[in-house]
């Protein structure tokens, strides 16, 4: 019986693939047989700034020359403000820095747009491909500001910033647009919405988050691999324009 989840000899590009989540995605794709190119400013080989279209185009051409035109693009590159971010990043909405907004939007939205534009065009010309845009529950729902009460307990002012939510919500309609635009060209485009992933955050935050989460804990980075493989492989051959929510039940209440 054919393994629907196999990615044997397929070519994948993962933006942000040098990060905590991205590196697990890379590992998972490679374990299923894919050749994976990491597009990241911290990558060993394909050092790509996803806000630079020419850099994406050069790296994509290099990948195509070595392995062939990509079959899979995972847009995982992103900026966020962590729970222990500096004060200027996490103050009231009214004073959130414009430069911070621009930086987050450039990477999270423009970077996804440009990577999809360059790599997706090559896929469409080949008549096949799968693009996965990695979003967040904070793009689908408003952040729960009470999770950060531990920061306020010491007299600090803290609000989960607006830019991350705005940027991640933008991906839903980018996905829908591209899914319909490239449907006849054989390119599927889907969103993967994730809840918080454990990354050695402050203990007070982890405890508050776990209490709010139906499944009772944050996600482990390796738990994103299965959903990514599903969306990248032939197992999801009739899935496009969809939002696969992998959030431990967060959005169920």
Image (cartoon, grey):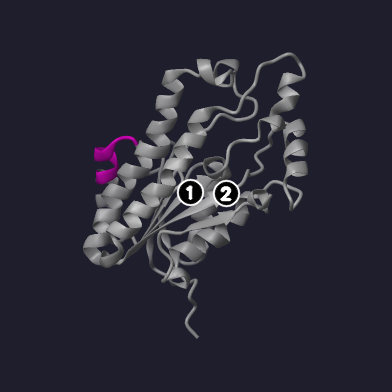
Say above or below: 148 vs 215.
above
Residue 55 on the magenta span: yes
Q: Position of residue 217 (x, y in %)?
A: 74, 47
Say above or below: 87 vs 109.
above
Would residue 57 be seen by someone viewing this image from the given angle?
yes
Q: Furthest residue to the bottom?
A: 1
Would residue 77 be seen by someone viewing this image from the given angle?
no
Residue 157 on the magenta span: no
- For the point 51% across and 15% down, which residue is it? 95
Say above or below: 58 vs 95.
below
State left or right for residue 197 relative to residue 244. Answer: right
| SS state under label 2 | strand
- For the point 41% across and 59% down, which residue is it? 241
Q: What type of secondary structure mainly makes up the magenta span? A: helix
Work out whether residue 218 or residue 28 is closer to the camera in this orientation and state it.
218
State left or right for residue 92 relative to residue 117. Answer: right
| SS state under label 1 | strand
Residue that mark 2 sits on:
194
Work out whether residue 224 or residue 176 is closer to the camera in this orientation and state it.
176
Work out whether residue 105 or residue 56 is closer to the camera in this orientation and state it.
105
- For the point 47% across and 82% down, which residue is it? 2
Q: Which residues are magenta?
A: 51-57
Q: Furthest residue to the front?
A: 253
Q: Position of residue 66 (x, y in %)?
A: 29, 57
Q: Residue 103 sits in which quadrant? A: top left
- For the point 43% across and 48% down, which residue is it? 172
Crowdedness of circle 2 by 10 Å Cα count: few (<14), some, many (20+)? Answer: many
State left or right for residue 29 relative to residue 121. Answer: right
What numbered label is drawn on residue 118? none
- Determine the CA span between mark 2 and mark 1: 7 Å
CB within 8 Å, label 2 to label 1: yes
Residue that mark 1 sits on:
134
């Amino acid at each position: 019986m054919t393994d629907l989840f196999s990615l044997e000899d397929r070519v994948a590009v993962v933006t942000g693939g040098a990060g905590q989540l991205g590196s697990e995605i890379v590992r998972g794709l490679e374990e299923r047989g894919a050749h994976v190119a990491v597009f990241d400013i911290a990558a060993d080989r394909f050092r790509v700034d996803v806000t630079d279209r020419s850099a994406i185009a050069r790296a994509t051409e290099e990948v195509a020359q070595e392995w062939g035109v990509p079959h899979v693009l995972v847009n995982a590159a992103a900026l966020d403000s962590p729970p222990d971010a500096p004060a200027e990043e996490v103050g009231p909405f009214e004073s959130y820095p414009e430069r911070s907004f621009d930086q987050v939007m450039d990477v999270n939205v423009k970077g996804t747009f440009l990577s999809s534009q360059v790599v997706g065009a090559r896929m469409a010309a080949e008549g096949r491909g799968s693009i996965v845009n990695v979003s967040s529950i904070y793009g689908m729902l408003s952040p729960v500001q009470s999770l950060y009460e531990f920061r306020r307990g010491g007299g600090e002012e803290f609000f989960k910033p607006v830019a991350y939510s705005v940027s991640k919500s933008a991906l839903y309609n980018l996905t829908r647009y591209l899914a319909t635009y490239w449907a006849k060209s054989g390119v599927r485009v889907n969103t993967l919405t994730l809840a918080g992933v454990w990354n050695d955050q402050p203990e007070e935050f982890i405890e508050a988050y776990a209490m709010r989460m139906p499944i009772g804990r944050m996600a482990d980075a390796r738990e994103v691999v299965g959903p990514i493989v599903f969306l990248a492989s032939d197992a999801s051959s009739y899935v496009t324009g969809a939002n696969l929510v992998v959030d431990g039940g967060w959005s169920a209440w």
